[in-house]
Image (spheres, helix red, strand yellow):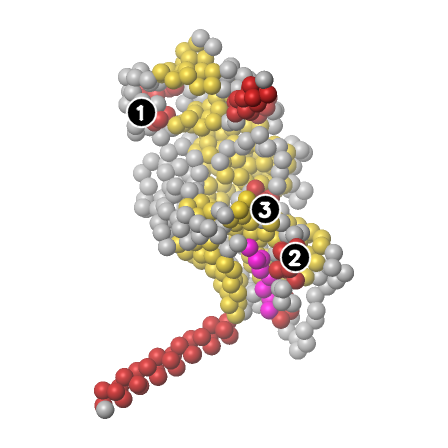
Amino acid sequence: MQIFLAVIFLFAFALADPQILYLKTFPLGSTTNITTENGSNLYLASRDLLTDLQNITLTIDGQNYSLDTLRDVASDDGSQYSMKLGSYFTISTNSVNTTHFSGYLYVSTAQQAADPNFSVYVIASEVNITKTYSGFSTTVILNTNFGVTPFWYSPFKTSLVSNIVQDPSSKFYIYPSIPYNNYTSHSRWRTIFYNPMVFENIAPNGSVYETEQLFENVEPLQLSYDAWYFSSSGNISMTISKLWVNYVQTNTTSLTTTGLLAISAESFFANANINFLYNPNNTRTTGMFLKCQPDYPVEFTLSGVNAVLEAYFNKTETTMGTLEWSDNDGTSLLVNSSFIIPGSFSVQYFIIDTGVRIVTSTSIPPTSTPVSSTQSTSSSQSTTVISTSASTQQSVSNVTNPVTSSVKSTTTSSSTKIITTSTIQTTTSESKLLYSSIWFSLALTLIL
């Protein structure tokens, strides 16, 4: 009896999960029953030909619908039209070969379908989205096929988020993939991008407190996932377009700004260089929020006038959330990988102009010391390490005073290195001296 009840519970729990069903997985002439949660919604995201879609039929509660009648239907606010589902529906492919199809069906949960602050948009060209709800709302973005791509590393599906305007009290979180049952809980550790950003600091008495930085300027955000979603509270507006901007060489547009480079697990990747706009007469803080679960090595290098901050990840050294920053007067961020399909990673980068540089002969100790935060995992363990744990506090306590080193870093499962400019110069000089000695010895051997 207990086993039977357990099976019933697991079956019911599975039904509560949302689904993405790719049309190309339903072969020619097939009829498939799809089990769903009663009260869930179904959406179509596709730019496949209407003449092809009319050969695919959905049967819902005994009624037949061809997919071509659902492709371009939107609500008054621009969100995608949905169909209410019962416990299952049937999809029949009739006389069409679906192997070349790029579209898919998205099935929400019943809870999401009943949520008045839950909406879905299909990006076929461009939509303008405005949110004014004081609480949190959830918006799902379904990307469609990009078509002919100009470069070998261009994504198949993508969208560009631009013209982001936020009220000072608003919150904005971006998550990859579709929202699951925990979509109403909001944590920056699950995001790939958040604004305002949150920084932990240590007061002189040793207590930890948080400060926020709202970036009024946000660089255009490229989201190359089949589907992604954002949660927001307060007044926020943006434009989401079916556009792709080459990220190989990127220049930021403001002295204080934040942006995002995100690569999905199946995407091609070319090494990226992001150059920061800065005033050389001002000091600045630069940093990055990293999430990295690659199949092949990926390295992030934050270059600055006074130091270089590096983070390295591979298949066994991953992070589910690492925030690193430095007041080394950063100038650029370089992202490198040794393989063209490295796996999933994202980096939210930021630069904060902190004012006119003050030249003084004495070092004034700070009133508080910033603390870098991390939440990381590796393939060998599932334990989550948070900044309040003993091991992380130890790594924080080992950070040199920012007045003398100007670098705050996080010890994670990745390899993180801090290279000062003087170290680089010394290494270069020693290398030249070593090479000179070797050539001299060879020459002397030949003479003798």
User: Could you tell me the amino acid type at mark 3?
Assistant: Thr
Looking at the image, is mark 3 or mark 2 earlier in the sequence? 3
Count of number-bearing discs: 3
Where is mark 1, residue-wise? 98
The x and y percentages for residue 227 are 46, 34
Identify the magenta region.
405-412
Mark 3, secondary structure of its residue:
strand
Identify the disc placed on residue 384. Answer: 3
Residue at left offset 48%, top offset 21%: 42
Q: Main secondary structure of the magenta part?
A: loop
User: Could you tell me the amino acid type at mark 1?
Assistant: Thr
Mark nearest the camera among 3 and 1 is 3
Q: Is residue 132 above or below residue 331?
A: above
* Residue 409 relative to residue 22: left or right: right
Mark 2, secondary structure of its residue:
helix
Is residue 409 rendered magenta in the image? yes
Identify the disc placed on residue 291. Answer: none
Q: Residue 250: in sight, yes or no?
A: no
Q: Where, by quadrant of the figure, is residue 1 drawn?
A: top right
Mark nearest the camera among 2 and 1 is 2
User: Could you tell me the amino acid type at mark 2?
Assistant: Gln
**CB of mark 3 within 8 Å of CB of mark 1?**
no
Is residue 251 rendered magenta in the image? no
The x and y percentages for residue 128 are 52, 34
Q: Is residue 16 above or below residue 405?
A: above
Nearer-the-camera pick, 193 or 399 = 399
Q: Categorize mark 3 by other alpha carbons within 10 Å: few (<14), some (14-19), many (20+).
A: few
Where is mark 2, residue-wise? 393
Q: Is residue 386 above or below residue 444?
A: above
* Residue 120 relative to residue 373: left or right: left
The x and y percentages for residue 318 are 49, 50
